[in-house]
Amino acid sequence: MNVKDLQSELCKGFVIRPTEGNGLSICTPFTYDDGDSVVIFVLPLNDGSFRVDDNGEAAFRLMTDGMSLDHGKAQSWLKSLEASHDVCWDDIDDELFAVAKSAALVAGVSMRVAECSAQMQVLSALRQERKVSDFKEQIMSVLRDIERETNVEARYDFAADPNQQIFVDAYFMAKTPISVVIATSGERLLEAELLWSMTQQISDPMRVIAVYEDMAKFSDKQLSRASYYTDKAVPWRKMPAAFHQMIKSEVTRKH
């Protein structure tokens, strides 16, 4: 292996162009989740140092996708970059930046900023996590309202199977008990199906109802199976009032 040839090939992954104000843009081989290259901008400062930033490109992609960067885990992650990479978060311009104290340090600082900008896309996972959490919280609020409206006691996070291994989100102690499983994942949907199968095997009259956020979250095969292997499998999106009434009717039914 020829080291110089390898170094030359690696360098081709970077394209440097001049920008306004005697600055530079560095197109790197790093990419965001959408496939666009991570581009770093270098601007000389009056004291002889250089500001190196990502022009807010990483943040723009996240915020366009509905991700808030103002608090919580996102802020904790951004603050950790200062200790781990000496890269800071500019909450005014919503961009990652670092300062190179001399021209000789620009290359290394640029690499750190580019790495953090690319890695910032992992925060999209927090957006998904928040969506799941909001969905479950909305359902739980409805279930608690139904408990108050019907005066039928509900137990939450309750082990409803004979072996006490499958926990339902709500267990209404109605004349015919009702177990509600909030299917935030395929695995959770399978647990509802397994619970229903167990009730059939032991002739338990308990009804098992699975609620999922919307049909787009699961395949047709998953939804078809869930409809067969539960008493009801219903979507939540766009029908919260109907869901409320359906669960209330199930809880108050006389047989």
Image (cartoon, grey):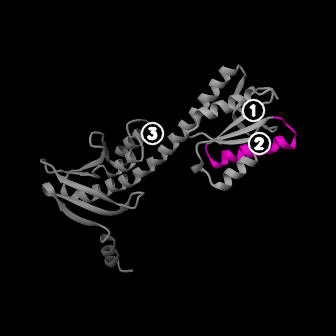
Q: Give the range drawn in magenta.
A: 184-205
Looking at the rendered structure, the secondary structure element under dot 2 is helix
Count of residue discs: 3
Q: Residue 73 carries which label?
A: 3
Q: Dot 2 corresponds to which residue? A: 195
Spatial separation of the CA atoms under disc 3 and disc 1: 36 Å
| Residue at x-position 77% and y-position 42% | 195
Give the amino acid at mark 2.
Leu
Label 3 vs 1, first from the N-terminus: 3
Label 1 vs 2, first from the N-terminus: 1
Q: Residue 176 placed where, x, y %?
A: 80, 30
Label 3 vs 2, first from the N-terminus: 3
Give the amino acid at mark 3.
Lys
Give the amino acid at mark 1.
Ile
Q: Residue 101 placed where, x, y %?
A: 20, 51
Between circles 3 and 1, the one closer to the viewer is: 1
Residue that extends furthest to the bottom in the rendered view of this protein: 1
Are the two marked residues, 3 and 2, in contact with CB atoms closer than 8 angstroms?
A: no
In screen coordinates, is 132 left or right of 161? left
| Residue at x-position 73% and y-position 31% | 250
Viewer-closest of 98 and 213: 213
Badge 1 crowding class, 10 Å Cα cut-off, few under 14, some 14 to 19, many 20 or more, is many
Q: Dot 1 corresponds to which residue? A: 178
